[in-house]
Amino acid sequence: MTALYLDYAATTPADPAVIQAMLGCLGQDGVFGNPASRSHGYGWQAEAAVETARQQVALFLNADSREIVWTSGATEADNLAIKGAAAALQTRGRHLISSVTEHKAVLDSLSYLETQGFEVTWLRPDDSGMITADQVLEVVRTDTILVSLMLVNNETGVVNALSGLGHQLRSRNILFHIDAAQAPGKIAVDVKALGVDLLSLSAHKVYGPKGIGALYVRRAPEVQIQAQMHGGGHERGMRSGTLPTHQVVGMGEAFRIARECRETEAPRVERLGRRFLDAVLQIEGVSLNGRLRVPNIMNLTFAGVDGETLLLALSDLAVSSGSACASASMSPSYVLKSMGLTDEQAHSSLRFSIGRFTTEAEIDRAADLVGEILPRLRERRRARTAQV
Ligand SMILES: *Cc1c(COP(=O)(O)O)cnc(C)c1O
């Protein structure tokens, strides 16, 4: 039997409609032309498909389609936003603000800038896991050029309190970048309401394909970033490379669907998440990490068991310890530790994340499995400690 998939925060399967749309952009009979070919219909057709997708993503964000720059994913979008803004603004200042709970794509881009003479102030959350606008405003300086924060944390689902921050930063002439990879379909992502200048998206967290994402780059007033990929000058000079029509069309369709079903999907997922939590939080020694979360991500600490042992025992469930990117390393989650969890507690934590294709029956089976296995593991551990 294949494991029950509860790792939607790591990636989602593509929606069947996304797959159909992508298939139409590959073969001889499809829209396979190079979107940059200006001399024939194959190119024009591909360009039209790309522009439709651009509008679909823009509509989702309440942006203009000319503000969408295609990238290979949120990792590249984060790199382009952070390094691109730093390079463009370095004569004005070299101070940046971010947080220790960011995705590695942001952490490592900023750490790289630290080696290049930039200074980063790293904000830390309290035990709620949240970073607030007030925390940012306390540390802004006259030489601050960029603030980079995530909207929804990928390990805990915690939503940062960024309301009003964008407008505060704009009045100080500081650029604001948001990594919103985990947010679409869960909470509103409106670039105007957020007052954001740069915003990263990924398709594969939203039932689109892997290998495609986008960076929103505000046009009015215009935000300048320096290209990190040099070549044919595609994407208005910000990101060179032939556009992968099928990927782009897949992302557009994914965001069209996300927009269309946001009224129905979010409440359904919330109900399923609540059902799972109601069951597992009844078990002794199980606690939920983070307050004010999106309901699809549930990070739980299981006192008295090791997360890796639990993961092995729960092999019928595809869940993760920490994030997919960090779980290759065995070090405990830096996100959970920053919220005050001990190494041991962080090691005893697992992330369950659900989504569009999760059913009530799956939720019940997952909760039952946790309920069966947890007491057994604890009993085994007690017996082993008693022997020693
Ligand atoms: C998944 C994720 C990324 C990376 O996105 P890719 O498209 O896989 O490169 C970046 N930030 C956050 C918050 C994510 O969840």
Image (cartoon, helix red, strand yellow):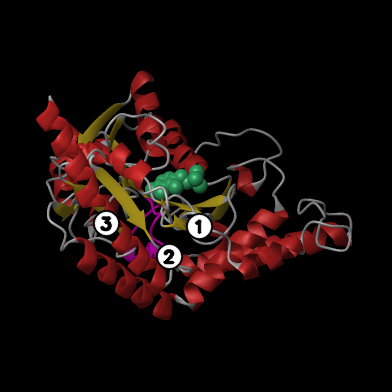
For the point 60% across and 42% down, the residue is 239
**Dot 1, crowdedness within 10 Å: few (<14), some or many (≥20)?**
many
**Which residue in the protein does label 1 denote?**
12
Question: Mark 1 touching mark 2, by CB under 8 A?
Answer: yes
- Disc 1 marks a residue whose amino acid type is Thr
User: Relative to 11, is 28 on the left or the right?
Assistant: right
| Bounds of the magenta segment | 179-198
On whether residue 194 falls in the magenta region, the answer is yes
Mark number for residue 247? none
For the point 63% across and 68% down, the residue is 16
User: Relative to 22, is 44 on the left or the right?
Assistant: right
Q: CA distance from mark 3 to mark 1?
A: 27 Å
Question: Mark 3 touching mark 1, by CB under 8 A?
Answer: no
**Which residue in the protein does label 2 denote?**
355
Viewer can see residue 224: no
For the point 34% across and 32% down, the residue is 92
Q: CA distance from mark 3 to mark 2?
A: 24 Å
**Dot 2, crowdedness within 10 Å: few (<14), some or many (≥20)?**
many
**Which residue in the protein does label 3 denote?**
372
On whether residue 220 falls in the magenta region, the answer is no
Q: CA distance from mark 1 to mark 2?
A: 8 Å
Relative image position of residue 196 (x, y in whole percent) = 36, 55
Relative image position of residue 5 (x, y in whole percent) = 45, 57
The local secondary structure at tag 2 comes to loop
Q: Under 8 Å from ligand 1: the CB of mark 2?
A: no
The local secondary structure at tag 3 comes to helix
User: Relative to 193, is 78 on the left or the right?
Assistant: right
